[in-house]
Amino acid sequence: MKYLVIAILLGGCTVERQDSTWQDQRFDDMGADVGLTIDAGLGEGPGAGTMAGTWLMLHEGSTCVINDEQLTHAWYVVEIQETDRVMQESRKLCRVDLSPILGLRVIIPEVVRDSIEFIDVDRGYASSLRVGGSYSSSTELALWGLDLENPLDDVLPAQASDPRVIDSDNDEQPGVTFEIENSTCRRYQGQRQIIRYDGVFATPNAVEGSSINVTDIKVYGSTEPLCGIAPPVISNDAHSRFRMVRVDGAGGAIDLDSNGDGQISCEEAAPAFDEVMTIRSADRANCAR
Amino acid sequence: MRYEPYACALLLGVASLWPVQASAGPFDLYGAGARGSAMGAQVANATGPWAIYYNPGALTGADVGLTVGGFATYNSAQIALMNRPAGYDIPELDVANSPTPTGAETNARQDTDGLEPIYGLTFGGVTSLGTKRLRLGFIAFLPTTELLNMTARYNDERERVFSNKLRFELIDANPQRFDAELAIAYRLTEWASFGIGGTFLTGANVGTDVYLQDPTDQENIDINLDVRTENRWGLLAGLQVLLPHDMKLGVSYRGPVSFRISGENRLQVNGVADDAEEPRQTLDWTPKYSPGSLALGFAWNVGSYQIAADARWVLWSDYRDSHSQRTNFNDVLQTRLGLEYEYSKEDRLQVGLGFDPTPIPEQSGRTNYVDNDRVLASLGSSHDVDFYGQGFEFSWFLQFQILLENTINKDATIQDCSDSATKICDEISDSLINPRTGQPFPEAQGLQTGNPGFPGYTSGGWIGAVGGEVTF
């Protein structure tokens, strides 16, 4: 009898898995990831015989931060004036997305983006406008929250009280204010960004290539201590690239001037953002020591 | 073949009408001493040093001497998780700070199969200090495997990135600890005795000072430790009254006692602005907790038999979980029924029955505190032996506790996750915007949860203990 009881105890009271009353959950197609489409292919067309006009550029800049790759995707509308193959370029930064580092993504508010001062330093040039021809941009020099006498050469101010640190986004904090996504954390900093683009004409209306990036950062404060950490940003140019396409309708290119005012704004260019170039995700392997 | 839990209980013959005890420390769960573990009901009729646990007032009836014993537990306690329906997993989103996607956890979601067994030695001692009416005694449980097993677990979706499983809240890690109690008792009159004492646990204030020289190299940090232990005592008090016709009455109180670890980490990070305040991380765990209780016991000697019954009101409503969070546990009434049969002058047989209601309410919401009603049955005997003129008492016991099967289905009412959420909660807000499209994520609509207890689970099985002791 006792063996029967023990056997029942050992084997008879086993817990069995029960079935759930919850039903499978299915998602309605919200059409969110389809993106906006344009009819004509970007970069197509026989070419206008000049680079003068309006171009849309996507730059995928790679840097290494804390041994992880941080990608900066920046969309610009570039106005080019050409004289004898030498070009004066003026850039308007329309959108910039940064990939997260250690799960923290820096958000650049619109007011900061609009406050960036691009400084005209030199000129770009193109050897040939035919397929395979070379393009070298003018230097993109941008100061964020800083006003330097020699923008290329001056050492960044060390203290927020330095008069060269300016509240360019008008939030009563020094420099520009970066946000941390899904956080109340804010970082106040000044930044100098120097970029040069070199590429070749993949088509007469599209230039593809790489970039050289130099970024200097100085943090002037933060709402939380950990937000104030500014680890070194190391250029990773081997994994940086760009693509620039004509969008003013010249030379058979697409015309994004939807309101016909002769100017292409960031809003008018936005529907084509996803078509400029297939972007990639950050890959830690690109920053392996 | 599967038996319904009540069938198991009937087969064991341990059905009881009255609730008995939910448990925390080793004595709370399995009883103190071989006779106590075998009979269960001891508040009015405890003998030897083990009266300290049940009713310090009864210590005046203890013979002077020492008791040494051994103790082991065994079990087949299980938690079987229901299979997750499709569409509720945490998706991988290109948004910072979004939860770890399902499948990327350190541990896969898994059932719980068994508790860590406990092996230990028991000690007890009683002295009269040369007086007739006074008794001073102590009891102790010393685990031989791990002196103190302390683990903290989250009881909601946060546990997914840690063990990713559920655990029995009150019978798993809680009983695995050193236990020491002492008391002094005095016979006030020929029919009344009073005793008072304490049950002991340690606590600790823990702090660390951390310096991070290079934020990019978080494997190399400098840490200083500051630990200060403290003694925590729980009050024990009891009264034993001898009634006419060989009847006894006992009343006792046991104060709550817990092992709490608190403190903070102070973090210095190189590169942070000089005027920035150091980040501080608060530490607060309560890995061990024994609730307070108030007990009433009755015993009656009828010929060669002694019948005993206990009722204990256990104050689980003050319970703090391992993260020191208050819970909504219920106070419960536990009862036990015991019988001792003296079948010869030197030999006694004991049996006991009981039923322990769980203090934990239905876990259909966010939390997964797992516990079961328990049916107890126990058996033991004591034998007096004369060895070279020295009297010895040998006792043993065998105890089973059936965990009545309990199935939890999570309620369909959901909330967004926040500190105050009590329902099963959505870890990704439906309004979260995809920064690339400017639209909400389709896969974030509805409920996404990694709660290991979702959509439900079933717990049950059995636990038991066996032990013996010698008193001289």
Image: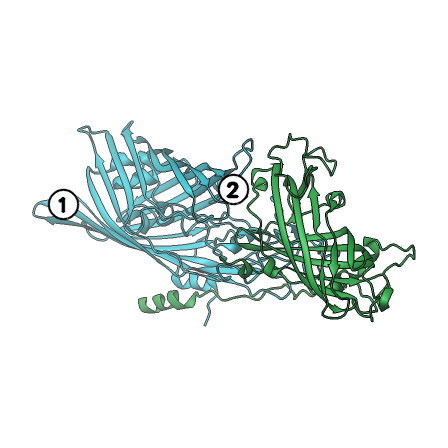
For residue B13, which quarter of the picture? bottom left
Q: Residue flagged by tag 1: what amino acid is it?
A: Gly
Residue placed most toward the observer, B236 or B381: B236
Residue A172: percent from the left, percent from the top? Answer: 71, 32
Query: Which dot marks residue B325?
Result: 2
Front residue of B238 and A169: A169
Chain letter of the residue carrying label 1: B
Residue A85: image quadrant is: bottom right
| Up/down of B76 relative to B252, above or below | below
Q: Is residue A8 visible?
A: yes
Q: Which residue is mark 1?
A: B391
Eyeballing the image, is A38 above or below B69?
below
For the question of whether residue B446 can be seen, the reply is no
Percent of width and height locating residue A65: 56, 51
The answer as to whether the residues below labels 2 and 1 share one chain is yes
As displayed, is residue A30 above or below residue B27?
below
Question: In the rendered structure, which amino acid carries the disc numbered 2?
Answer: Gln
Above or below, A283 against A225 in this view is below
Marks 2 and 1 close (CB-CB < 8 Å): no
Residue B140 placement, left or right of B388: right
Chain ID, cyan in image: B
Which residue is drawn at the image coordinates 55% and 43% (left, top)? B328
- Chain to which the residue tagged by mark 2 belongs: B
Report, in whole angstroms, how far the alpha carbon at label 2 lies from the one at label 1. Answer: 50 Å
Query: What SS does tag 2 mark?
Result: loop
Chain the render paints green: A
Q: Nearer the viewer, residue B440 or B416?
A: B440
Residue A254, image x, y percentages = 84, 65
